[in-house]
Amino acid sequence: MISIKKYRVFPAIIYGIALSALVWTPATQASIDQQVAPQQVLAKQNKPLNPEEGIEFLKESRHGYDIESLVISRDGQILVSGSLYDKIHVWSMKNKKLIRTINPGKNGSTTLALSPDGQNLYTGTYLESGIVQVWNIKTGKLIRRMNSHKSGISNLTLTPDGKTLIAAGQDKTIKLWNTQTGKLIHTLKGHNAPVSAIAVSPNKNIFASSAGIQGDSRDLTIRLWDIKTGKLLKTLTNSIQTAGFLTFSPDGKNLISARGKSSDYGRTNIWNLSTGKIIATIAKSLIYIGFTSDGKRLLSVDSLYGVDLWDAATGANIRQIVEQIKFEDDRTYSRVYPNTAAMSPDNKTLVIGEGGVLSGYRIGIRQLNLQPIKSTSVDTNAPKSNKFRYEGILRENMAQLLGIEEGQVKLVKFEKATWQKCLPTPGRAGTCQPVTLSGHRVVMSGKGENWVYYVTSDGFITLDKRIPNVNTQTLVGRQMSC
């Protein structure tokens, strides 16, 4: 059905092998420098999985249409999935078993929100006349119905304390509800197109909204609102596309806007909310993107099943976890795709819901291993994009070779440098000629060892040598020579 083209593993010597198996000579090092680019240095250790490796599909999943919404409880124990024209499925994340189903009506449920205590489930669909239903998740019984909008509901979300429900309507309005009484608090107007996405800031007082669907350019704005007063605080206007997915950083200072589900083109923007400006852009169409709990990285799922880890400050790609799928023909793409995703609060589990008639409407669970990053960079003049990019590559390289966690590896120094190298002389085997290279010198520390790397301006990485138990001050000025 699907032809997956695996990425070729670079056949050159990998540092993890070379460190213990080779006699390090200038000619050997030069040979490696010529062949190994930064993204290939860790090819053996960090080769991305293909989309069907390392994923477990829920065997009891019997959804009959695209998986439209996934939500995981705060304690990571419960998963809820919603679909068009179908029942809601409640799952145990521990044993991957179906606990119960809930029948929301003939049109199913396309948006879900789960209360902080995991007791109440809020459901809606963009096909019905704006009705929000509240369910007891343990019994599956209906608690309350709220007539929220004149047309369908695009998105539901709760404030962190669970006391306010925010509903985005296709009637261009936003409704805020008191979850304890079921009474309407505010009706907000301002968008010029159906409201498509809602996200609440961790500070509890602000939420963001976006409007429009793919191909609808009537309203490209993202609006920030005060939850208590309902007042419009700020409008972000620099986007060139609609946003179907929004999420705040853990500190509430930045906002991510992405194209959203079933999108095969577009880009993802990282906004600074104090200035209202885009500070970084990921040129990739993403159906899901979420911050890791440390706020320093982003995990994404794209429309071709690719899973990537990004630097949240710069938008630089740290590594690809799962490669994109390669289809036999274009017709297959429109009939198999990831439609929605969710990451567990502890960042250890990624859940993906599929869409398309050839997909089987599966729900896949992938275990993640994302270690926190603690940067101790001291060279503020170094280009940030390169510094973050190479720090991530070298941190993971050193951690894997030493058998420790990434959080135990620290960046000690990142500074501009020049050094001499010997490159092979054309036509004269076993000989080399000296050249001067420029770029950055990077010192990484972990498990009582300091390793020195050199990164050229055009991005080639050299490991100077493994230096155990050496004070970093003695490394200043140390350069490779012929």
Image (cartoon, rainbow, N blue to C red):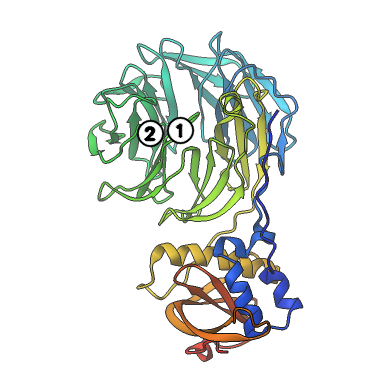
- In the image, taking residue 449 as reference, residue 186 lies left or right, namely left
The structure residue drawn at horizontal position 58% and vertical position 22%, both measured from the top left corner, is 66
Q: What's under tag 2, amino acid-wise?
A: Ala
| Direction top: furthest residue | 106
Residue at the extreme front of the image, as rendered = 427
Residue in view at x 34 percent, y 31 percent: 210
Secondary structure at numbered mark 2:
loop
Residue 279 x/y as whole percent: 33, 52
The reply to whether discs 1 and 2 touch (Cβ–Cβ < 8 Å) is: yes
Identity of the residue drawn at 34% across and 34% down: 241
In the picture, which quadrant includes the N terminus? top right
- Closer to the camera in the image, 97 or 379: 379
Residue 369 is at least partly visible in this image: yes
Q: Is residue 225 left or right of residue 260?
A: left
Pick the quarter of the image with the C terminus.
bottom right
- Label 1 – label 2 distance at C-alpha: 7 Å
Whether residue 450 appears in this view of the structure is no
Q: Quadrant of residue 22?
A: bottom right
Assess disc 2: are there few (<14), some (14-19) or many (≥20) residues with their C-alpha within 10 Å of its C-alpha: many
Residue for badge 1 = 260
The x and y percentages for residue 198 are 39, 32
| Above or below: residue 188 compared with residue 205 | above
Tag 2 residue: 243
Q: Is residue 53 above or below residue 195?
A: below
Q: Nearer the viewer, residue 287 or 123?
A: 287
Q: Quadrant of residue 139?
A: top right
